[in-house]
Every structure is written in C-alpha cells, then in structure tokens.
Amino acid sequence: MSKNIFLSIIAYLVMQCTFAQSTLPVASSGKTIFGSNAKIGKYADIRGIKMYYEVYGTGKPLLLIHGNGGSLENFKNQIPYFAKNYKVIAVDSRAHGKSVDTGDSLSYEMMADDFDALLTKLSVDSCYVIGWSDGGINGLLLAIRHPEKVKKMAITGTNLWPDTTAVVPSVFNELVAVNDSLAKVTPSPDVKALKKLLNLMVFNPHISTADLKMVKVPTLVIGGDNDVILPKHTMAIANGIPQSYLWILPNSGHSTLIVYKEMFNQVVADFLKKPYKKVKGMSQLE
C-alpha cells in the first residue's frame, strides 16, 4: 500500500469520527459498558445475519439507531436516561459493531428492513425511534417502508441524498477521494468492509423530498448549525415531513447528542411525551 493511500484511509477514519463520533467502551468499576454487556447483549437471527442488540428498562419501546462506522455504544449518554421510562432497544446495525455481515452489498433499505425484522422478532408492533446520522436515514426509511412500526421519531444529522447540496462540500469530496483511493488497495476483508461503509455514504441514500410525505408520524428533525449536514438540508427535511418540528442547535457540529447530551435528552423526551401540535395562524405571533 502506498503512503498516499494509507494517509487517505487514515483521513477517512478521522472523518468517520466526525460523522458518527464512535468511541470505544472503556471499562469503569461499577459502570455498564454499553455495546459490550455480556449479561444483557443478545443476537437475533434475521435476514441472513446475527444482529446484536441490548435491551434496558421497561415501558413503551424506543429503538436507537447509530451512525456509519458506529455502534450502539454511541448512545451511552442516552440509554440510562431513556431507560428510566422506556424499554430501550439499542442495536448494532448490519455490518457494524458486533452485527457481522460478510456480504458484498449494503444499503439503507436493507438496514431499515433489518430493523423491521428485529422488531417483529421481539414482538414489538410499533416503537419510538431516535436515529443519529445514518441512523436517521434508517429511521426515515423504516417509517416509509414499514409505517406501522414507528410511533414517533427524532433524527439528528440526517441527509436525503449524497452530494454537496446536502453534505459540507469539503467533507463529501474527501469521502469520495478516499473511496477512489481504496479501489487501488488489495481487497482484504478489512478493506472490503471499509469500502462497503464508504460506498454507503458516497453513493447513498436516495430519498426525495416527495418521499418524505410518506412519513406519517410526528418527527423532530435536529441538526447543528455547524453540522457536516448543511442546515438548509436539515430544514428541507423538516419542511418535507407533514408533522415535523425543527431544532437547529447553535454552536454545534454533528455530535448534538454528545456535546449537548443533557439538553438533547430533555428536548427529545418532551417531544416523545407530548402530543404533536403545529403552531398555526395568529398563534405564530405568540
């Protein structure tokens, strides 16, 4: 492998941290290691893979979907908070974390169908959803393809299509460059796995604003004002969903649920708890 290609891969890994903010679990005395909880973690045989998941708490089901390159551990700041009032279902998506997938293809539609199958296997008729980054894409597609499975949804750092009108141009162009560089690398299992995740971001998703009309559930659309997903794109998503709220966090990048975890948890919890009500007419002046 040439030095330039190696550096490109390193650049991608750094970029991946920007996108999904994945962090490895660190053992702490007396603390649960989310994503590596041997007592709680289980595998579900669905759609040709073994999908890893952990369930915490009781109450109405709440599905957590992480971003590209991440794992359920990314929600370590949300799981304890929401498990007080919900049955939290935290999952490693296909080809992520402990959910190994050796296949060559990967799509958001495939992943959305995975979540539908997992919920069915767990006898969950419908649930609330929190999706981050690619997890937000999966949440949208779950609501579009399997509308009966979603009650309400909060998504943050989500895009509808892969280009510089949705993603900060410098970030998107770097992802494309790294993906092109990987084509020159000997396709070892690690390289194939990396390229599969890159292809997911560089060539997908393909959701139109018209498709958003099929999202029939109340949706809280979230983004940072300095997100890798352009705020105008986040606004377009909110405008396209019939029942939506928009929340742009000031002085925030892609990691809204990490950097502003207390605020994020409280606002999303309020959204899930309260009936959807759109401000209309003269009340907009209040």
Image (cartoon, rainbow, N blue to C red):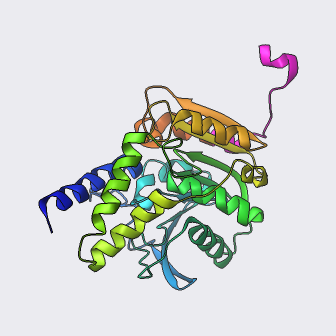
Asked whether 49 or 200 is in front, the reply is 200
Say which quadrant the C terminus sits in.
top right
Residue 11 location in percent, x, y? 25, 52
Asked whether 64 or 100 is in front, the reply is 100
Q: Farthest residue toward the right?
A: 281
Residue 160 location in percent, x, y? 59, 50
Asked whether 101 or 199 is in front, the reply is 199
Q: Can residue 286 be seen here?
A: no
Task: Indicate left or right for 249 with 140 as reference.
Answer: left
Residue 153 location in percent, x, y? 66, 50
Say which quadrant the N terminus sits in.
bottom left
- Asked whether 278 falls inside the magenta stretch, the response is yes
Asked whether 272 or 285 is in front, the reply is 285
Residue at (61%, 58%) from the top-left corner?
A: 206
Q: Is residue 19 above or below residue 5?
A: above
Residue at (66%, 62%) from the top-left corner?
A: 142
- Asked whether 215 falls inside the magenta stretch, the response is no
Residue at (68%, 39%) from the top-left corner?
A: 238
Task: Indicate left or right for 140 with 103 as reference.
Answer: right
Residue at (13%, 64%) from the top-left corner?
A: 2
Q: Farthest residue toward the top?
A: 285
Residue 106 location in percent, x, y? 50, 72
Give the tally of numbered discs: 0
Q: Farthest residue toward the left?
A: 3
Q: Is residue 27 above or below residue 220?
A: below
* Residue 100 occupies quadrant: bottom left
Q: Can residue 140 be seen here?
A: yes
Q: Is residue 87 above or below residue 212?
A: below
Report the magenta residues as a range.
Answer: 269-286
Task: Indicate left or right for 243 with 105 as reference.
Answer: right
* Residue 147 occupies quadrant: bottom right
